[in-house]
């Protein structure tokens, strides 16, 4: 039987999502495209179409600079807008995206490694937050070039559009669960655009809707249906993480109610979870009347779920016609068929026995066993579905069940680098009519003209558990190596339906040498019915079962419902030795498996403990919970075992957290649960959090919590230092400088040209500055020995502050003992939880520490992007008391400067404060070195806080804040870093004052510095070195892009008489590793040329 589509008027032929997004950004620039809700509650980020394309093009420009169209990039992101931006950036740059999910703590990387190997990926895109989590993992991705997309400094204007044809590969969709032999479905731009239009036509969507998506973004339904397709219609998309849904499924419904969501995409189990967690008293204001389309797919759609959900939530405005049962798969990009709008789901009641014989007979007699099957609707837009006899490869007659075959423009190109499998799966032809090629789905179903497609089962062995496909052979391979008691090639993994859910069963043959150790009564197969066991649980049985659970959880994130241990040679197999999973499942259900032992045990519980929240009572509750949920005896729950040992998958973990909150009132964070390991540790942690009498707690704290040498971050440091040692070159850090560090320095008896210190104006070591410092020591001693507020004030302090204020052009100034502490104490003191701090994404650590100390809401904006900042202010300004914008005069990593007038304009329009950190711009920018204010010729009172340091242009140590008298007066009496700190030393104060006076009297130092800096920059760029965005500053980076290569280049230059320090991970991302040249006015043209020549030599020898 061939099913023709309802309509075939796809008008966007040849259109790609790149073109569609560009048109959206052009014609609807300010319409919201994506919103992300942190923890499913708080809106933390939002992008309009214009902002989205702006960020996409910036990342795409960077990708174009380091790779070529057709290269593969692994995308590892948590749910959020970073993934969306990076995925589109790959499409724009012609890079083939390979979406994946960050591995969990302690999870092995075999699946990701196999995907990298199969895809032949060369890039790995992620964020700075995720990078350390992956970088620690067994050196798994050292062959890839890392790109931290939230640290990219390229601009959207740097992007060069490329030609993208419909048959160009857009991304590889690796099928869920496949670890041993991954299959990457090749989805072209034409496939993607066509299927997005198929979805629009199937559900008759309009642009007046809102989509809510909690599905993983690496999943075909979450990616295409819930994230990309709305671009076609113009929907805004609200994203939340899968864990936010699993922890509280009703949260999903509350968001639908709050945001008036119209469209959702979810597998069947999501609706079941909502029913299970339903509590009427918590939903008094729930309104689901806006919900128009509830797409139900990715796993078998259950009639019982639909009926129960409608009955439960109809009182809250949910309409039966909202349900849209659907059918699709990654091999068809996503959707094949979908239910029609304005109609309730069509459910057919069939005779179950007839279905087993591939016949469709309506159930009318009482003696028949009914089975309800839900229609998944019709295809459209040129998609064609055929019901085919999988043996004869001819059409099935009406009323017969056959394999579902599909053809159309949404059918993908095949499997990446698997020609034979592609031919078998994507190249099927009908024997009698020669029609084709078709995609063989491996699914079974039948067709009715009015109702459409009904899916009845699968030919393939793929297991579908909570909407995810899992390959049994991969699970079996994992189990096989989990414990030495198990026979090789004698494991069967299959599913059974229990209480409406697919549950994983693992049957394993035990080696003969282990059977006698089990010491279990010999018992015939017929004496052991399904879901029961021989008489006594024994330690070895539990040991094997725990090993299996732990391995399957780590590799597949699956909970094993029951472990079956079989006698050697009894697992059903073919004559060639192939495991017969279906026969094994049927034997299990019939009670005909020759079990040696089973892990499913009768459970008996001791009396519940009172809620005194002692360690013992909490651990008792945990043990009871584990025993109840995981079907194990309470005696077998070991407090020293990790939760992973009991097979806790993400859904079960979320249930645990919710049940714990119900019992104790304490909301546990999922990451805390994962990090604590043993449940004994969890009990101790909870006792500390909950118990009032802390004296009763005797916590057994692991060494990494209190022994510094065991800190994970210390171990990571040692690992990085060991990597440097492997290069067989000296450690470049903490090298002793044996002389004045001016244009030259002396190290290990050698004189080198020095580019590693920020003695910009050559005033450190200047005889007049040194003389002033010495005179101050003779007069005041080496320290003022007190806070200036008490008795540490000296005339030198007042003179320096007055002259700094005059030099900058403001009313007053305050000097602190440390530049870093200046930012920390000022920001931390002026702002609190009522306020918002907006800072440049490349801000110095001292700014970040000040933000953390303040307790204010902090939001970074893209580097130097005043337009993005403007949008944040439009959305957020009215929600806060004080808002401060923090930028730098010269950014120390890239040596670039911000467009200060633009930021002043934003400050004035949105009524905020503006702080400028001039650590590297004072004494450097402007004709007379008066900083970025002079450079742009702006009124100095238009900036509220001018911050600077004394250790660079002023040849001393310390920091300052300059501004209004009111500001400085307040800080001098209240700022903790000033009031409770010793005053600046006489020598440092005098040195800074003398340097400032010399700068004012000898402005030619600034002119020379600017000339030498420009000379170095132009020569380096002429040689093709990547100097990032450096301009108009004496900081010139040479970006190498690899930490170890950067260290090697530094060493090579050292040997050539050039001292320049490497900046490597974690100070910068690995792909941003660089040498950072600090230019001084003392450098001569000859010295600049010598450094450039040394760089050229290094490049010529491949260093």
Image: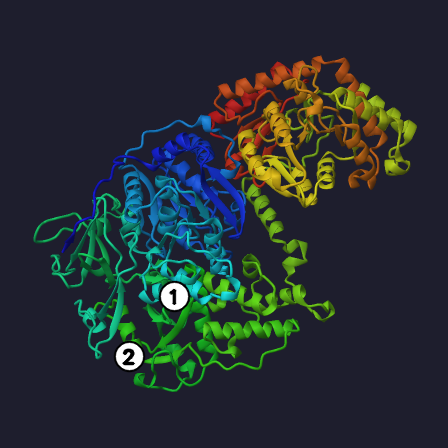
**Where 313 falls versus 901 (above or below)?**
below
* In front: label 2 or label 1: 1
Question: Which quarter of the figure is the N terminus placed in?
Answer: bottom left
x%, y% of residue 326?
30, 55
For mark 1, give the secondary structure. Answer: helix
Label 1 crowd bin: few (<14), some (14–19), many (20+), radius 10 Å: some
Seen in the image, is 710 located left or right of residue 18? right
Q: Residue 311, which numbered label?
A: 1
x%, y% of residue 818?
75, 35
**Where 930 falls versus 60 (above or below)?**
above
Depth check: give the residue in front, 223 or 551.
223
- Indicate the quadrant where residue 596 lies: bottom left
Q: Residue 118, which numbered label?
A: none
x%, y% of residue 153?
52, 31
Depth check: give the residue in front, 67 or 440.
440
x%, y% of residue 109?
44, 54
Seen in the image, is 793 located left or right of residue 1013? right
Seen in the image, is 468 located left or right of residue 642? left
**Where 146 falls versus 892 (above or below)?**
below
**Where 293 falls versus 282 (above or below)?**
above
Rendered residue at 83%/39% (across/down): 979
Label 2 crowd bin: few (<14), some (14–19), many (20+), radius 10 Å: some
For mark 2, give the secondary structure. Answer: helix
Q: Is residue 1058 visible?
A: no
Q: Earlier in the sequence, mark 2 or mark 1?
A: 1
Residue wearing tag 2:
590
Rendered residue at 44%/77% (across/down): 541
- Indicate the quadrant where residue 1037 lies: top right
Q: Is residue 247 visible?
A: yes
Cα distance in 3D space between marks 2 and 1: 35 Å
Depth check: give the residue in front, 1011 or 337.
337
């Amino acid at each position: 039987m061939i099913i023709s589509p309802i309509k075939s008027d796809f008008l966007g032929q040849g259109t790609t999502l790149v073109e569609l997004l560009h048109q959206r950004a052009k014609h609807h620039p300010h319409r919201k495209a994506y919103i992300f809700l942190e923890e499913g509650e708080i809106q933390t980020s939002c992008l309009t179409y214009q902002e989205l394309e702006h960020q996409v093009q910036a990342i795409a420009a960077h990708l174009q600079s380091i790779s070529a169209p057709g290269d593969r990039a692994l995308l590892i992101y948590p749910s959020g807008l970073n993934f969306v931006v990076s995925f589109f950036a790959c499409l724009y740059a012609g890079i083939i995206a390979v979406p994946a999910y960050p591995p969990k703590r302690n999870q092995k990387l075999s699946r990701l490694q196999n995907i990298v190997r199969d895809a032949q990926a060369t890039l790995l895109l992620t964020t700075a937050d995720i990078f350390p989590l992956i970088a620690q993992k067994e050196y798994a991705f050292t062959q890839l070039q890392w790109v931290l997309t939230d640290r990219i400094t390229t601009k959207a204007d740097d992007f060069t559009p490329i030609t993208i044809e419909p048959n160009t590969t857009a991304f590889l969709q690796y099928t869920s669960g496949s670890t041993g032999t991954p299959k990457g479905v090749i989805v072209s731009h034409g496939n993607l655009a066509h299927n997005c239009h198929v979805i629009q036509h199937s559900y008759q969507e309009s642009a007046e809707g809102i989509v809510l998506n909690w599905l993983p973004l690496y999943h075909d339904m979450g990616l295409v249906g819930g994230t990309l397709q709305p671009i076609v219609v113009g929907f805004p998309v609200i994203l939340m993480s899968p864990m936010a849904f699993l922890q509280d499924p009703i949260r999903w419904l509350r968001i639908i109610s709050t945001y008036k969501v119209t469209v959702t995409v979810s597998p069947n189990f999501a609706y079941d979870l909502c029913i299970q967690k339903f509590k009427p008293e918590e939903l008094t204001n729930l309104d689901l009347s806006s919900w128009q389309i509830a797409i139900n797919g990715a796993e078998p759609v259950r009639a019982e779920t639909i009926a129960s959900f409608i009955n439960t939530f109809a009182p809250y405005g949910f309409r039966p016609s909202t349900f849209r049962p659907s059918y699709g798969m990654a091999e068809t990009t996503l959707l094949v068929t979908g239910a029609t709008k304005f109609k309730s789901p069509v459910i057919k009641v069939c005779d179950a026995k007839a279905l087993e014989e591939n016949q469709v007979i309506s159930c009318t007699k009482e003696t028949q066993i009914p089975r309800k099957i839900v229609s998944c609707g019709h295809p459209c837009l040129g998609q064609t579905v055929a019901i085919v006899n999988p043996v004869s490869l001819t059409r099935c007659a009406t009323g017969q069940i056959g394999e579902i075959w599909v053809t159309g423009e949404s059918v993908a190109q095949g499997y990446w680098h698997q020609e034979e499998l592609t031919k078998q799966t994507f190249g099927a032809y009908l024997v009698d009519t020669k029609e084709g090629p078709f995609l063989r789905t491996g699914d079974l179903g039948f067709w009715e003209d009015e109702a459409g497609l009904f899916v009845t089962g699968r030919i393939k062995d793929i297991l579908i558990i909570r909407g995810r496909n899992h390959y049994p052979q991969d699970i079996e391979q994992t189990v096989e190596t989990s414990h030495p008691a198990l026979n090789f090639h004698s494991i069967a993994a299959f599913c059974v339906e229990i209480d409406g859910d697919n549950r994983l069963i693992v049957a394993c043959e035990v080696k003969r040498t282990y059977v006698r150790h089990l010491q279990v009564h010999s018992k015939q197969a017929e004496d052991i019915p399904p879901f029961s066991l021989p008489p006594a649980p024994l330690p070895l049985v539990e040991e094997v079962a725990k090993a299996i659970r732990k391995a399957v959880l780590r590799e597949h994130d699956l909970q094993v419902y029951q472990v079956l241990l079989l006698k050697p040679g009894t697992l059903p197999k073919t004559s060639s030795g192939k495991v017969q999973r279906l026969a094994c499942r049927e034997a299990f259900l019939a009670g005909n498996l020759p079990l040696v032992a089973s892990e499913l045990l009768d459970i008996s519980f001791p009396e519940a403990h009172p809620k005194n929240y002692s360690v013992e009572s909490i651990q008792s509750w945990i043990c009871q919970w584990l025993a109840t949920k995981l079907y194990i005896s309470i005696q077998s729950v070991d407090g020293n075992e990790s939760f992973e040992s009991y097979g806790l998958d993400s859904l079960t973990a979320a249930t645990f957290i919710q049940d714990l909150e119900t019992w104790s009132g304490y909301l546990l964070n999922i990451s805390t649960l994962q990090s604590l390991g043993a449940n004994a540790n969890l009990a101790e942690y909870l006792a500390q959090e909950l118990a009032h009498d802390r004296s009763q707690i005797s916590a057994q704290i692991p060494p990494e919590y209190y022994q510094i040498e065991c800190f994970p971050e210390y171990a990571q440091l040692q690992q990085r230092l060991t990597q440097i040692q492997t290069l067989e070159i000296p450690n470049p850090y903490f090298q002793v400088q044996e002389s004045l560090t001016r244009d030259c320095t002396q190290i290990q008896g050698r004189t080198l040209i020095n580019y590693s210190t920020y003695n910009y104006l050559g005033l450190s070591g200047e005889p007049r500055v040194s003389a002033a410092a010495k005179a101050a020591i003779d007069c005041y001693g080496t320290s003022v020995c007190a806070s200036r507020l008490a008795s540490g004030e000296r005339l030198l302090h007042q003179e320096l502050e007055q002259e700094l204020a005059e030099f900058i052009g403001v009313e007053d100034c305050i000097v602190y003992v440390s530049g870093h502490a200046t930012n920390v104490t000022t920001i931390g003191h002026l702002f609190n939880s009522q306020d918002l701090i907006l800072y440049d994404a490349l801000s110095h650590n001292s700014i970040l520490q000040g933000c953390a100390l303040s307790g204010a809401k902090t939001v970074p904006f893209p580097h130097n992007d005043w337009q993005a900042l403007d949008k944040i202010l439009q959305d957020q300004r009215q929600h806060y008391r004080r808002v401060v914008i923090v930028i730098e005069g010269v950014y120390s990593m890239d040596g670039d400067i911000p467009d200060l007038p633009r930021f002043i304009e934003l400050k004035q329009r949105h009524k905020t404060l503006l702080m400028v950190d001039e650590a590297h711009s004072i004494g450097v920018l402007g004709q007379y070195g008066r900083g970025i204010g002079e450079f742009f010729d702006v009124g100095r009172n238009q900036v509220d806080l001018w911050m600077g340091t004394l250790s660079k242009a002023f040849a001393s140590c310390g920091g300052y804040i300059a501004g209004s008298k009111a500001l400085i007066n307040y800080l001098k009496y209240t700022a903790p870093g000033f009031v409770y700190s010793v005053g600046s030393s006489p020598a440092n104060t005098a040195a800074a004052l003398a340097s400032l006076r010399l700068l004012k009297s000898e402005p030619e130092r600034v002119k020379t510095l600017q000339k030498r800096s420009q000379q170095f920059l132009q020569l380096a760029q002429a040689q093709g070195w990547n100097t990032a965005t450096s301009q108009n500053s004496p900081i010139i980076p040479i970006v190498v892009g690899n930490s170890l290569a950067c260290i090697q280049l530094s060493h090579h230059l050292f040997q050539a008489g050039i001292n320049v320090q490497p900046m490597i991970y974690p100070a910068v991302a690995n792909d941003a590793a660089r040498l950072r040249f600090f230019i001084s006015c003392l450098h001569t043209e000859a010295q600049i040329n010598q450094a450039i020549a040394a760089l050229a030599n290094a490049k010529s020898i491949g260093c």
